[in-house]
Amino acid sequence: MNENALQLENVKLKRDNAKLLKINNALMQRVEEGGNQSAPYATFEHSVHLSEQVREKTQILNETLSQLERSNRQLNTFKQRFTDAIESISEAFVLLDCDGRVILQNSNFDAFLDSSKLPTNTVFNLKALTKQSHQKQVNHEKFLLKPVYQLPDGRWFQLNERPTVEGGRVLLYTDISALKEAETARYEQAMAQKSLQLQSLVDNLSQGVVLFSREKKVEVWNSRFVQLSQLSDQQLCSNPYLSTMKTLTELDLCAHLQLGSDSFVQTLSDKTVLQVNIHQLRDGKIINTYTDITERYRYAQSIQENERRLRLITDNVPAMIAYIGADLKFEFTNQVYIDWYGSSTRGLDISALDESLNFKQIKPFVKRALNGESVSFESREVNHVGELSYLLKSYVPNHDSNGNVLGFFVLIRDITERRINALALQKAHDELEVRVVERTAQLQKLNQQLRNEVDERRQAQTDLQMAIREAELANFSKTKFLAAVSHDLLQPLNAAQLFTGSVLEHALDEGVSALVRSVTSSLNDLENLICTLVDISKLDAGVVSADKSNFMLSDLLGNLANEYQQQSDFYHVRLRYVACHHLVYSDSVLLARILRNFLSNAFRYTNKGKVLLGCRRRGNNLSIEVWDNGAGIEQTQQMEIFKEFKRLKSSQSAYSNGLGLGLAIVDKISKVLEHPIKVSSTIGKGSLFAVQIPLANSDCFLELEGTQTLLLKNTELAHRKIWLVDNDINICAAMRALLESWGCSIITAVSLSDLEKQVDIAEQHADILIVDYHLDDGVNGLHVAQKINHLRETALPVLMITANYNKSLKKEIKEQGLLLLNKPVKAMKLKTSMLHLINNDK
């Protein structure tokens, strides 16, 4: 209760007490003056009773007054404490009643009213104005409860409002000027920091950037633009307009501005190539960006040059090569193909060559190829000069990653001579049979005619053998030619692979790196195609022989396992390798070819399965086995897979790669090595491919182990000095780029005299001498190496490189104590050979 209510209650109690006293006096007077003398005692008793009641009432009234006085003192104490409490508040405090009158306020509120220069009757108006102003900015309930406003002197206040039980309000004004100033300072600091970060970002861009206003005035530029335009910051500030600035720089600043947004290429006088992008913004401003694409431009030119070289290689392959898309249009033909049909077929529909191709004859095979089947067949056709020929055609489908056929490759070989020889043999055979029948009938009549018939039969057999020998000589001549021409084909291919290998040693943009990897993949595919054809031809010609020696089988199998472990994720196959530490006697290179084909086929024909590589000992022999749990091979097809261009369709990944020559090569190599091949397969469970090789004498083990230990030492090529002699300038450039990327110092020369002009071959230090075998003017690398080492006190380690696979040359180089590499040279093989020479030289 407040003080006014207590005072009113006190007045009321005093008034009631006065009434009771008046009633008591009246009753006493009435008793004393009463005429009934018969009951004085009763009257006295009644008065005593009334007196007792009055006394009790009076006591109660006195206690109430005492309690009221105590409450009044407590109320005064509470009021003083409440006043002290609101005075201790740092904010301006005011208490209003339900009519808006001020009941209580502290000194801070008085100071607030004085400093704000507002009349005291504007408390409600100020609150209402604050709410109205705040609602225009933030329409949200939680903000309306605590409005913020600014006084004319710049100070900021926050208003907190609470209703009271009696309908009044408590208002609390908090000065937040310092908070507002700190917030403003932080905002300005953040904006300044963001401006610095933005300018730093622009300055660190690899592109030159400049921003023009609508009035064609320079507003923003970065350091790269200053570098490219050769304009200083002072010039840009003093000549900010486009009309004056474009005469001071070589950069094209205003071309195509009327188009709104454009892009073009500009070449500067210093051969720098720039990609210029001009963007016109909606507000009329213009942003020019200048990107240095010199390296990318040069890479594109290099790729075009490599493509030209690839075209040169395919045009010199003695076979017709073409690619036909799914729309039956030619997308690629080599020069041999063009020469056969008399004109370029690129872009033509295959049915447009009906007169020459006899499209109705080959249409079923085309359909099978587009259905994903690899086919080979013979065709009888007429070339552009009217000559009738017999062709052996192979159609190999090209699949995308989803297994869809995008087109098919065409490989055509002229077998006219072989077909004529076969017809001649057949004709001779038929004639022989006829003669045998005739002579047999005549034997019954004349013995003399029998002797004559025998003589004629012998003559016929002689003619038949001569025809067979002529056919074999013709086939041998063809394969020998293909094997011999490989040197001229592999020479530019070797240079192209060395160039791409050196390019990949540098950090490239992702797009350029993808292009280089595509070129490398195409070169590898072409190398595999050429090498495969050459291998088939060499094996058919009988020029391949085994160079057998004792070696540790674990080295070969370990390398193969590591190699194919890298490919397991790509084929989704898990490879398990069981190590084998036997010493065997074989040709490690040819044996590796057999095992690679086994593993490649196992990976391709095993979808998300397992492949096992291991050995089994069988007496004095060792069976190297490759197991898989793939789809398996039909019993009727297990001999067919060793024929040329024969592949199974049980795996899309296998069917989209290769030409079906792998197992044909395996069959031929196994006969050269005299190593039996074993095939075992179960449909739905998997297949086994194995080759059986003889074990070697274990006494050779210690010698091989020492050699391997030596090879593991010193694998560093940095700062090694290399001399290279090769008459092909492109190969010299490619080798320089590759070896310098390994940290080597290389001297290249096209001849011995060229090398003598650059270095002192007798005294100057070098770590390795690399020489190509076939040099100009009939000079070979062996003579060059011998002459150099003859003049030196200590002979240089020599690495001989050649595309000649002749066995006698290989033997001669080996007898000279030199290391031989056949072209095309792989970067890793070259590096390994160089490390081998350096280690052995110690």
Image (cartoon, rainbow, N blue to C red):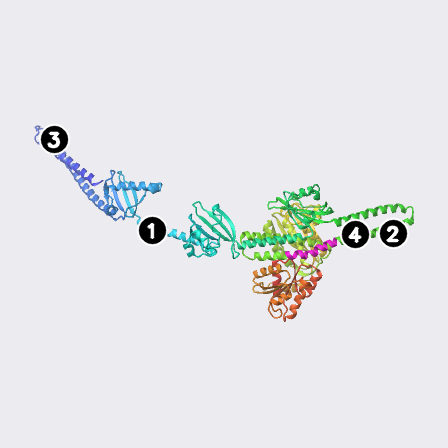
The answer to whether marks 4 and 1 mark residues whose Cβ atoms lie closer than 8 Å is: no
The answer to whether marks 3 and 4 mark residues whose Cβ atoms lie closer than 8 Å is: no
> Label 1: which residue?
182
Which element is circle 4 on?
Answer: helix
Between tags 3 and 1, which lies in front?
Answer: 1
- Residue type indicated by callout 1: Ala
- Residue type indicated by callout 4: Ile
What separation in Å lies between label 2 and label 1 (alpha carbons)?
Answer: 125 Å
Mark 2 and mark 4 lie on one chain; the one further toward the N terminus is 2
Which element is circle 3 on?
Answer: helix
> Label 4: which residue?
468
Mark 3 and mark 4 lie on one chain; the one further toward the N terminus is 3
Judge whether residue 487 is colored magenta: yes
The answer to whether marks 3 and 1 mark residues whose Cβ atoms lie closer than 8 Å is: no
Mark 3 and mark 1 lie on one chain; the one further toward the N terminus is 3
> Label 2: which residue?
455
Q: Main secondary structure of the magenta part?
A: helix
Residue 254, given in percent of the width and then of the height, sits at 47, 50
How dense is the environment of label 3, judged by Cα within 10 Å: few (below 14), some, or many (20 and up)? few
Mark 2 and mark 1 lie on one chain; the one further toward the N terminus is 1
How dense is the environment of label 2, judged by Cα within 10 Å: few (below 14), some, or many (20 and up)? few
Residue 506, given in percent of the width and then of the height, sits at 55, 57
